[in-house]
């Protein structure tokens, strides 16, 4: 029933920008905390950014802070990740994730905290 579908991935050069989006269905979107994770080839999936169900709280991993922005549009049941000043080390498959939070302002930074996952979208940044 619950589906998360990422889109917007592609191949860009270092310094470029890209926006990946996630369309959710089968859930009451506004009641779920959302997150973005990424997995580079040969590495473990890592946290990138998250936003609370209320939208009043966001958090980013240190390596993307100041470059990436997470936002959600509850009416459209989508969450997006705006990626600016991309670096080759940002190359990865980007995954959208959702989980029901214990409080409205809560957000998670671990893969184990999320219940639902999309299939991912590839982002490749060349130097």
Image (cartoon, helix red, strand yellow):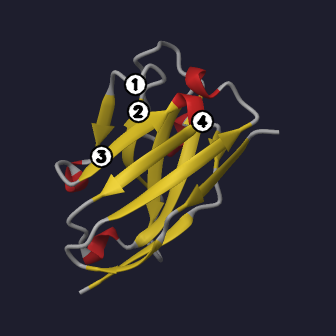
Mark 2–mark 1 distance (CA, rounded to whole Å): 6 Å
Q: Position of residue 107 (x, y in %)?
A: 42, 28
Any mark on residue 77, and which?
A: 4
Mark 2–mark 3 distance (CA, rounded to whole Å): 10 Å
Q: What residue did someone put label 1 on?
A: 55
Nearer mark to the viewer, of 4 and 2? 4
Residue 29 position by quadrant? top right
Nearer mark to the viewer, of 2 and 3? 3
* Residue found farthest to the front: 75
Nearer mark to the viewer, of 4 and 1? 4
Q: Secondary structure at mark 1?
A: loop
Which sits in the foreground, 28 or 90?
28
Mark 4–mark 3 distance (CA, rounded to whole Å): 17 Å
Query: Residue sitting at 27 percent across and 77 percent down?
Result: 88
Residue 115 position by quadrant? top right
Mark 4–mark 1 distance (CA, rounded to whole Å): 13 Å
Q: What residue did someone put label 2 on?
A: 51
Q: Which quarter of the figure is the C terminus placed in?
A: bottom left
Q: What residue did someone put label 3 on?
A: 69
């Amino acid at each position: 029933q619950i589906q998360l579908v990422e889109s917007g991935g592609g191949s860009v050069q270092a310094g470029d920008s890209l926006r990946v989006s996630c369309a959710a269905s089968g859930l009451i979107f506004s009641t779920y905390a959302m997150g973005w994770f990424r997995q580079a080839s040969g590495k473990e999936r890592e946290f990138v950014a998250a936003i609370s169900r209320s939208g009043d709280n966001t958090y980013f991993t240190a390596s993307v802070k100041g470059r990436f922005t997470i936002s959600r549009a509850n009416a459209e049941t989508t969450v997006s990740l705006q990626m600016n000043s991309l670096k080759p080390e940002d190359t990865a498959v980007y995954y959208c994730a959702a989980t029901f939070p214990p409080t409205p302002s809560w957000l998670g930074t671990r893969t184990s905290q999320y219940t639902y996952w999309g299939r991912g979208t590839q982002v490749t940044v060349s130097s």
